[in-house]
Image (spheres, rainbow, N blue to C red):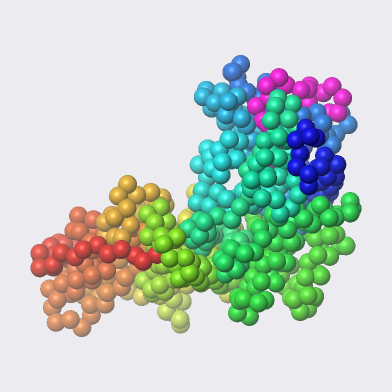
Amino acid sequence: MKDKLPDDVSLDAIHTNLVAQEANNEARIRELRRYAMEGFAFVFDQAPLLLNVNSPEQPGYINDPATPYGVRFIERQSWLSEEHRHDSPLTRPVDNPAVESLLLIGSSGSVGHTASSDLDYWVCYEPERLNGRPLELFQQKLAAISDWARREHGTEANFYIINLKELAAGRITRLDEAETEGEVAPLLLLEELYRTILHVAGRPAVWQLLPTGISREKYQALSDLLTSGESAQFVDLGFPALPAPQEFLAAALWLARKSEADPFKGIMKIISILEYVESDFQMPLLCNDIKSAILKAIPAELPVDPYVLAIDRITEYGARSLTPEQLDLLRTAAALKVLGSTGSGQVFVIPKNSPKRLILEERATRWGWDEDRIMRLTNYSRWPERERLYLGGELLNMLSSVYVRISHYLISNYPGQVNPQDEELAPLAARLLARRGGLDSTIETLPSQMHRLSIASRLVIIYDPDSALWNLHALDDSAMTPSDDNLVYAAGRAIRLGAWLVHNQVLRPETIVTVGLSNAPDGLTDEHFLKIMDCFKRDFPPLELVHEDTNDLWSAGGQSKVLVVLNFEAPHEEAKLLSADYILRTGWGEMRHFYVDVTGLPSSADQYLKIAQSLLREGNARPENLVFQCPDTPLMHKSITNIRAALVAKKRHRPDEKKSRIDI
């Protein structure tokens, strides 16, 4: 092999790089254990061992003799406990093991590790050895281990099974069907793997051992040499490279739209993309910077931390390129991610004098923050809910603005290389632009999945006659009475508040909703409001953005159910019709609320026509799609019949309109 190496690469250099990478990897594992909860640490220790066996005595057992198992070289791993180092059944070598390399991607072993961190494993396999029925059985085994980790130890352990041949060719197969930015930007996902990689077991990645700045051609030649043969010690995960402009556009759009689950992490990722784009792709990949730092580092107790390097790079870029307000939001998001304040709500205490605390304090000093600012962020979980929602909303607005900045730059500077009308991106773009549109009719979206899950399960709706608002309060054991601190949402119309609950999936099976509407206008009762909520839950289930016909995307609404609430002066035959509220869902998934005031019109016919005209103008509604909610009286039935008739009459005299496309 030595004779085949190029003159500028020696076995000694490769060995030196291997030693540096292994030392950093071991330091990362020590950091993982420093911050890991007990269940997280136990799953980390056990998961590789469970992959190495298929025994009825162990979690993850699949009762089929064809079930693959085994992790290559597992007996060599330095993190093994003493009991597993010497001829343990769990670490015994397996002939033709299923797993060639077991890696962790993400925040594990970095200052980004918090109480809500997951174990995201890449389980790499050779397709020649694992396919067909055995591959299906192996996937079942991985799912069983995930279930065990969640059920028994309260830890999310996700196993992404990776075909090494497709990975090396730049294609990443995600058989778990998870929605990630990797599906739209696989090269950026590969860069994230190399940037945050933690080698758990099996063969390490050959890229980590090769010189920095190596060309793709030289990488491939060296990789072929070092990964060939049955006894090869390394695996080829592919060459990290900058994607084409279209992939950057797709990744930025995915982050801007999908980061509602975690806008804190999303804002950090999208600023990194902005830097690549506005440097005209001249900035080195962050994974290359981190590898250089590792290979230059003197072995030490603390590792080269990918999270710290990423934070420093994007905040330094932000200081040059963002507005002061955006820069402050970026730094806040980074600090809260390090503090672990944006996750599942578990209390995450950072030990004094720990690397995490020292790093955070050093950055705070660099940014000009005082001790009160850090203390306030440390107490994020105790902020009033409305303050947390406001911050999350500001982050979502910034995500949208940065995406627009990225897309404008790419379209202006790389014409012909980006396609803003890509059909696969259309659902994301439509919903993003709807959020940016600022329409008063659009039902507001919670800024993160964490907020939805953390909202207390006892919700109280109270009408405040002084402000003429419907207020939603989330109560728990620490706050049993409604107050400004537990105010979650306020709306001028009851139906809009109900739509907000459904749109944001706040209504869970365990949720208890109580209403106090005795002072509400127009005689709306608790019973009537709960009936409206039943209609919402029945007619507006969570929407999956899957369209067999992408033309459906451009529907403004009314193609499915439209919930109409008629509001009368009083529930009797002579009562006057005062107004109508209605809710619909657009083709791109947002919910909209419209209010029609019909007081002051000269006749009932004029009232019905005005409501029908609004339904057609805003919702493109059809009579058969209308679902009415109002007091059950003869007047109600008469009004419903006449509104349907007015809708038919209006549609007959309405010219056909062509569906318009949204400019992504």
Q: Picture quarter containing residue 418?
A: bottom left
User: Residue at position x 78%, y 66% from top?
Assistant: 360
Look at the image and give the residue range highlighted in magenta: 84-105
Does residue 349 appear left or right of residue 563 in this picture?
Answer: right
- What main secondary structure does the magenta stretch of the protein show? loop
User: Residue at position x 34%, y 65% from top?
Assistant: 662
Any magenta on residue 101?
yes
Does residue 301 appear left or right of residue 277 in this picture?
Answer: right
Q: Position of residue 53 (x, y in %)?
A: 70, 24
Q: Picture quarter containing residue 427?
A: bottom left
User: Residue at position x 40%, y 72% from top?
Assistant: 437
How many marks the image carries: the answer is 0
Q: Position of residue 283 (x, y in %)?
A: 64, 64
Q: Can residue 455 be seen in the rendering of this structure?
A: no
Does residue 64 appear left or right of residue 378 in this picture?
Answer: left
Closer to the camera, 314 or 438? 314
Q: Position of residue 570 (x, y in %)?
A: 26, 72
Q: Position of residue 422 (x, y in %)?
A: 39, 56
Q: Picture quarter containing residue 551?
A: bottom left
Looking at the rendered image, the quarter that the C terminus falls into is bottom left
Q: Can residue 1 be seen in the rendering of this structure?
A: yes
Q: Is 485 located above or below residue 532 in the figure?
A: below
Closer to the camera, 138 or 511? 138
Looking at the rendered image, the quarter that the N terminus falls into is top right
Any magenta on residue 174?
no
